[in-house]
Image (tube, rainbow, N blue to C red):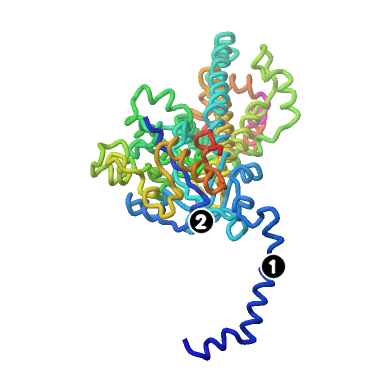
Amino acid sequence: MARLKFLCDADRCIECNACVTACKNENEVPWGINRRRVVTINDGKPGERSISMACMHCTDAPCKAVCPVDCFYNTPDGIVLHSKDLCIGCGYCFYACPFGAPQYPRVGNFGSRGKMDKCTYCAGGPEPDLSAAEYEKYGANRIAEGKLPLCAEMCSTKSLLAGDGEIIAAIYKERVLKRGYGSGAWGWKTAYKETIDV
Amino acid sequence: MTRTGTDRRWSAHGIAAALLMLMAVLLMLPAASGPAVAQVNPTTEAVKEEQLMQALDRVTGRVSIPDQKAATLIQVEGQEWRAYHERTLAWIGGIAILGTLAVLAAFYIVRGRIPIEGGLSGRTIVRFRWFERFVHWLTASCFVILALSGLNVAFGKSLLLPLIGPEAFSSFSMAAKYAHNFLSFPFTLGLVLMFFIWALRNIPGRVDIAWFMQGGGIVGNTHPPAGKFNGGQKVLFWLVILVGGAIAASGYILLFPFYGTTIAQMQTAQVIHGLLAVLLIAVILGHIYIGTLGMEGAFGAMGSGQVDLNWARQHHSLWVAEVENQAAEEGRRGVPPSAVPAE
């Protein structure tokens, strides 16, 4: 079985933010929430790189470990999903997540958090595949349609790669060998406890 | 092509330009024949995740969306917080709470219920007036719900979730979360009121040292003298005020996420909140024990507000003397004695 991962080839990312926009549009993401964002490191300085980041769907995910109501689960492909019916909006997954993926719509008094929202790898949620309830809560389920996440599919420079970890790692390796440089698979060590050595 | 064009091609300007180009090419020849430095390598200066991690333990950049906290790309402290929450807190909390319960059970088996020496006298003395009792129970009832809902967040998924199933547990936890958030306000009010009504009576003195030297009468059969509050109660009071206050303060930081705090500060606040909370729960378990099961005649103080005179003489001899002196003085002045309850 495939182990689905994200890989952002920072040497190709041009910070066009199309992945961010595509994600918001495809999943009808609530106002104020960005499931994916592009972070520019060393902005305006030599060696500047932009990295598109969302939930990395970690191996042994920290959010899943700390959730007090155990609302996270893994799909057979290794995607980390959660149930908004079970989520109580406590904020613990945000404390634990290395990538700042979980976000909460603000509801009610002071800092009251609503049900957590994060990248689903375009794989919906626990509701029946492609149901209206699933779309309303989690957005698209492209995986059920046999497609990859839209952010990666429509990346204009093919910087953002989604797919089986071994395959995208091989593509990245080949690129690094061919062009002679690569700033590394950002977040892989933290998320998957491995790096891509070239 | 016209004659003028040909003329211009061989004009003085043209020849000069051609010569300059030739010179430039000749000047560049030695550089090209040396090592291949001309090839561009963007990674020589590219930022590397590992370098950034080693420098700061987190990687932060710039985002073009309004949510500026999204500018933190990777924060590894989350892993440490996870280890604390899943292992450290579970162990410390488990040992503190179960350990206290075990100690109390052992104490009860060995010592039994501490009786009133000489039995009930039948005469009572007012220990806590209605406002004092109201403040106590306001704080106490909030604390019990805050403690249980807090423990539910830490231990519920291992203890309660398997028993009642995910849906019921989630609904319960959601209600518990709201209770935890909202009851923090009356709890804090209780702490403030407690401070104002009891702080003066809880200033430690020489009598308390003697009280502790004799083990507070808990060990052995001596009855060290004590005022309205004995040494142990004073320690409890200041623990409740200071530790309770710190728990409340760290809780409000968590209740207002990103109100001038960063995620690292919120993680720290959560660690302080959890550790102090299990400490205070353990302390309060001892307090509940001695106020109910552990000692005959003690509950009346916070129940009806009155205690038996023999109980008061046994545990708070100096306070009884003080009240009696006051009553005698008031009696001389023709004021109704305060030892008679007005309620």
Q: Which residues are magenta?
A: B317-323
Residue labelled with disc 1: B26
Instruction: Say which of A196 and A198 sits in front.
Output: A198
Say what amino acid the circle numbered 2 marks: Val
Quadrant occupied by the N terminus of chain A: top left
- Identify the residue at horizontal 56%, vertical 37% (top origin): A197
Q: Residues within 10 Å of mark 1 (few under 14, many from 20)?
A: few
Q: Quadrant of residue B202?
A: top right
In screen coordinates, is B1 left or right of B59? left
Q: Is residue B342 visible?
A: no
What residue sits 68% from the left and 65% below the top? B28
Q: Is residue B66 above or below residue B277?
A: below
Q: Is residue A182 above or below residue B179?
A: below
Query: Is residue B135 magenta-colored?
Result: no
Image location of residue B105, percent across then percent down? 54, 13
Residue B139 visible, this orientation = yes
Nearest the camera: B189 or A141?
A141
Residue B122 screen position, x and y as percent: 52, 19
Residue B322 belongs to magenta span: yes
Which chain's residue wears label 1? B
State the residue in front, A114 or B72: B72
Q: Could you say whether the residue bearing mark 1 is in a helix, strand or loop? A: helix
Give the residue number, with chain letter if any, for mark 2: B63
